[in-house]
Amino acid sequence: MAVQNEITYAQAVRDAMREEMARDPDVFLMGEDIGVYRGAFGVTQEMYREFPGRVIDTPIAEAGFVGVAIGAAVEGMRPIVEIMFSDFISVCFDMLLNQAPKMHFMFGGKVQVPLVVRAAAGCGTGAAAQHSQSLEAMLCHIPGLKVVAPSTPYDAKGLLKSSIRDNNPVIFLEEKTLYRTKGLVPDHDYTIPLGQADIKRTGSDCTLVTYGRMVPTCLSAANTLLKEGISCEVVDLRTLLPMDKPAIFESVKKTKRLLIVHEAVKTGGLGGEISASVAESDAFYYLDAPIRRLAAWDTPVPFSAVLEKGVLPDEEKVCAAVRELMG
Amino acid sequence: MNKELASRLLLKMMLIRRFEENVQYYFTLGMIHGTCHLCIGEEATAAGTCLALEKDDDMFATHRGHGAAIAKGIDIRRMMAEIFGRSTGVCKGLGGSMHIADKDVGVLGANGIVGPSMALACGAAMAHKMRGEKRVAAAFFGDGATNEGIFHESMNLASIWKLPVLFICTNNTYGMSTHISKVMADTEIEHRAIPFKMKACTIDGNDAELVYETVRAARAEILEDPQPILIVENTYRISGHSKSDGNLYRTKEEISAWKEKDPIRTFAGRMEAQGILTKAETDALWAEADEKIRAAVDFATQSPYPKVEDLYDSVYAE
């Protein structure tokens, strides 16, 4: 029987990095205030002591240090870059749009970019419009990138290890409100392949496709709905690019109803992509109700706690949407 | 300057000139599609710089990168095939003129975006330094790139982390059509190294020998004592910016004056005057360049086109 420890999401991320740095001397870490400050969200903690010279505090120059990480990756290193808030991807976007994801392709396959960009994403912290966004759809629009958004400590550790070992640039979105959540993680080395969804709960009446922070929200909603006799299946995508569409289709064929839930704004969000993919597949013929998307309002994230809660999906809204789908 | 080095420098410059002239010709015939940024007139910056590097050194080029790639040692036939969009191209037809690359000879890519070459080169230099390798990275960029934020971020990072990187500014005085005097309060690009406490120099980029000696010395220095150095190579783009260029921003007199400073003719003339190469020998080098480029065009035009069915296999690495 494998030993399991209850640890936080933040520790799971940290343990994945520590273990990979111990097994591979090419792995190193760069970012703003990840050394003695211990990281803006306390993810890196004492790593700068454990790995001298391999946990590098950078100037506030995201384009510069992400570019440096890409150059080092091209030369065979495996850098992990921390972007303090995923919103700051805006100031290094050339690197994540035109450079890292294109080099393997446009250089005819001779160059690899084994880079991980970790970024704290999502809202719920009252940090307002420039520190709360969910930008995954924009990133999933870039062939050559991989985009990961784990919801549990177990998934975070296993997926981060796979991301570090992957030979492509991976954007690893860590939900900042999940950092302190706890879960069981085995103490042996394990990885979770990128591109595989996980059925977090099986059910027969309605499929909830979601990821990141909305996974616990959907699981709570599923509990509530079960008491009303509605059985929900919760599909956690875990990796957003490449997306495990077969897992979605299979679940939809079983439950015949689909609700997509994400924290990102609705317009141009992944809900549209998922919905269209189902509509284009044979799963469409199984649907007993129209596909439904539940997402944040199409506004910047507001500051006031009342407003922030107001624009976001929550358990109550998920329950209401499912009830409507059940007709 | 010994005979062997003089011949190598001259041949590289001649190959670049003939390569560009042929690209221009086949472009005009409609046999090459897309766009091309030619470096006619700037051959000494490419040849002098890249011959001063070793094969293991990394070189990151600009959108005007044909010359640097040729000088660094890329296979000319496969590079020509790339520009013709063929499957035998150095990038299998996926990159084209603006993304010429071959990691095997340290050509880590021309770049369609102005500026990022500098940060990427810093990263390669960081990898070399972390592994204790005796290699350097060089980043080419133009005068225009020095107004980009990434220039200043990269200069700062290289300086504080003491990265063995050579910043090679090919200053042709025009960002596309815009003269540096319109976009810089101080047009001495070398001065931009001062706030970063970085060594810098400005040289005649049309003097292949001077470029070679300067870069060679800088390379030795940063291997001994890891640090970045900025070298501003003043030169001039005789060719237009790209196919859309109507030369409305400069005079015929200006272009003619710079043609007098043609880097190939001046270098060949000096080598002949100094008795290092004979006229017959420089003529033979032209003939060799002609023959190699002709063979490259033959190879390219006889090569098959890539298949679109295979494209998805190229997006991600294993």
Image: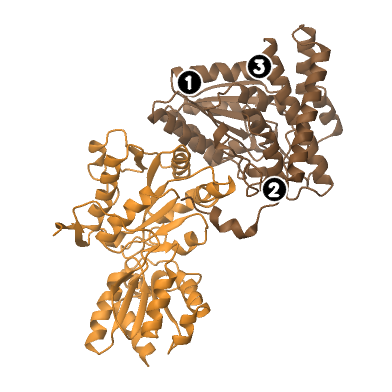
Question: Cα distance, mark 2 to mark 3?
Answer: 37 Å
Query: In this picture, is A40 found above or below B53?
Result: below
Q: Nearer the viewer, residue B31 or B250?
A: B31
Q: CB of mark 2 within 8 Å of CB of mark 1?
A: no
Tint applied to chain B in the drawing: brown
Which percent across, then down, holds residue A225? 26, 85
Local packing at callout 3 (Cα closer than 10 Å; few below 14, some 14-19, many 20+) is some
- Chain in orange colour: A
Question: Cα distance, mark 2 to mark 1?
Answer: 39 Å
View extreme (top): residue:
B275
Q: Nearer the viewer, residue A100 or A25?
A: A25
Q: Amino acid at mark 1?
A: Ile
Q: Secondary structure at mark 1?
A: helix
Query: In this picture, is B52 found above or below B22?
Result: above
* Sequence-first tag of 2 and 1: 2
Q: Which dot marks residue B86?
A: 2
Q: Chain of mark 3?
A: B
Which percent across, then down, holds residue A154? 25, 60
Q: Where's the C terminus of chain A, which quadrant? A: bottom left
Asked if badge 2 and badge 3 are on a common chain, one would say: yes
Which percent across, then down, holds residue B125? 46, 31
Which percent across, then down, holds residue B197? 47, 24
Q: CB of mark 1 within 8 Å of CB of mark 3?
A: no
